[in-house]
Image (tube, rainbow, N blue to C red):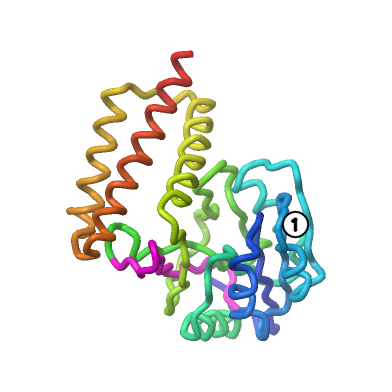
Amino acid sequence: MNISTDKPTLSVALIVKNEAKHLAACLDTIKDWVDEIIILDSGSTDETETIARRYTDKFYVNFQWPGFGQQRQLAQQYITSDYVLWLDADERVTPELRQSILNVLQDNQHNVVYSINRLSTAFGKFIRHSGWHPDWIVRLYRPQETHYNNAQVHESVIIPPEIQVIKIAGNLEHYTFENFFEFQKKQSQYAELWAQEKHLQGKKASVASAIGHALFSFIRTYFIKCGFLDGKHGFIIACINTQYVLNKYLGLYLKQNK
């Protein structure tokens, strides 16, 4: 683990589509202390571009959607800074997290990626159990040292063997869906993408395995991950997770049996 004495620069990068509702609130939390904001849009039809251009002139569009992982790889090609912090439009950097990120820049270590604890809401309430929190995700790293994988959905940063993962203090607040059916629609889209990807990889499923995975998802979310401590919201999340897992595996089963 080497330490450089040069003052490093920081980019914030986002991939977006129709995020006019959230984008300004997200960018307001980082606009005054980062060196560069990179936004890659996939074809917004709302005011996303207008809002984005108030904060940056580095706004790009890619209409040929390749999946989440490859879209992030494309966005990374526009980055010119020493570090990149990845955000989603519905996320907010808290003051404590900001200070932790500034400390990372001051330390300026090589061969390190940084994991951030995301605290998410569901239907207006922060969820502190149910497998949602703690939610450590690698979002800060040197773009010269790694990048996102090719996953269609639930993409993640590739961690080479020589790179160390360090957790930093402060929550990344994540304001997810307030509308139940909007949430269900997004989960259905993710399930379809998952089934497509696994089908191409040759993964198999059965009706029995779909039911088994779905039931275990409820048990894991509500009991093992203490979803009951989140009250009624925890029960709702457990039910949503169960439906999501069932959709994934039934979708895969139907694809392999066309």
Q: Position of residue 245 (x, y in %)?
A: 35, 39
In the image: residue 108, left or right of residue 64: left
Q: Is residue 109 magenta?
A: yes
Total residue callouts: 1
**Mark 1 Cα shell of 10 Å, populated few (<14), some (14-19), many (≥20):** few
Q: Position of residue 55 (x, y in %)?
A: 74, 75
**Near-viewer residue (134 or 182):** 182
Question: Which amino acid, mark 1?
Answer: Gln
- Residue beneath the point at 39% across and 34% down: 247
Give the image quarter of residue 127: bottom left
Query: Which span is picked out in magenta?
Result: 108-128
Up the image or down, 258 lies above or below 74; here it is above
Farthest top residue? 258
Q: Position of residue 251 (x, y in %)?
A: 43, 28
**Near-viewer residue (238 or 69):** 238
- Residue beneath the point at 74% across and 41% down: 64
Give the image quarter of residue 121: bottom left
- Residue beneath the point at 71% across and 50% down: 42
Give the image quarter of residue 243: top left
- Residue beneath the point at 71% across and 71% down: 37
Q: Position of residue 109 (x, y in %)?
A: 57, 75
Of helix, strand and loop, which mostly describes the magenta segment?
strand
In the image: residue 171, left or right of residue 9: left
Up the image or down, 120 lies above or below 196; here it is below
Q: Is residue 11 magenta?
A: no
Query: To which residue does mark 1 refer?
Result: 77
Up the image or down, 113 lies above or below 191; here it is below
For mark 1, give the secondary structure: loop
Farthest right residue? 57
